[in-house]
Amino acid sequence: MFRGRFEHAIDSKGRLSIPSKFREILSTSYDERLIITNFDNCLWAYPAAEWQKVENKVASLPQFKDEVKALQRVFISAACEAPVDKSGRIQIPITLREYAGITKDVVLVGMTMRIEIWSRERWQQSFEQSQKKLELMGDKLADLGL
């Protein structure tokens, strides 16, 4: 499982180094390919096997529902394959970098079965908002068994 936060920089060609802890998980539990898509002001990167589960779930949903069509048009259509190269980097397309506001400083966040890729500025804002929400959600977390 992916956990932890790591700060990196993306180069001018859109190449991003994957943290060694994440690369180790990819090489021992998966093949070394990520599927990257856009969602929630950042990028979501799944190991290819985990992405296949997401696609299968979406494919099983009622295809004529507006919510499903929106999910496919935004989330699924943006997905692209990003193999990890010999230097431990992935190439992120310009369209995805623009969506996430990624220009240089990046934060990679382990989210158990996926990795989120954030611009550092957006990450700081989102983290602060999430921290405030979490402080108010004690009862809801208890209801989930945490």
Image (cartoon, rainbow, N blue to C red):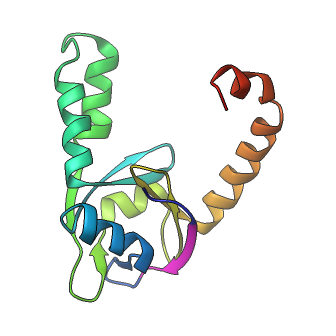
In this image, 31 relative to 78: left or right? Answer: left
In the rendered view, does 38 fall on the left or right side of 101? left
From this view, report whether residue 66 is shown above or below residue 123: above
In the displayed structure, 113 sits above or below 20; it is above
Can you say which quadrant of the picture contains the C terminus?
top right
Relative depth, front residue between 62 and 32 = 32
Q: Is residue 79 left or right of residue 25?
A: left
Q: Which residue is painted at 21% across and 87% down in the image?
A: 86
Q: Residue furthest bottom?
A: 87
Quarter-of-image position of residue 33: bottom left
Examine the rendering and report whether any part of residue 6 can be seen: yes
Magenta span covers which residues?
5-10
Main secondary structure along the magenta-highlighted residues: strand
The location of residue 25, given as percent across then percent down, is 34, 67
Residue 47 on the magenta segment: no
* Residue shown at the point (26%, 36%) measured from the top left: 54
Q: Quadrant of the N terminus?
A: bottom left
Residue at figure coordinates x 66%, y 50% from the top left: 126
x, y percent for residue 28: 26, 68
Q: How many marks?
A: 0
**Residue 4 falls left or right of residue 127:** left
Which residue is drawn at the image coordinates 77% and 29% (left, top)? 137
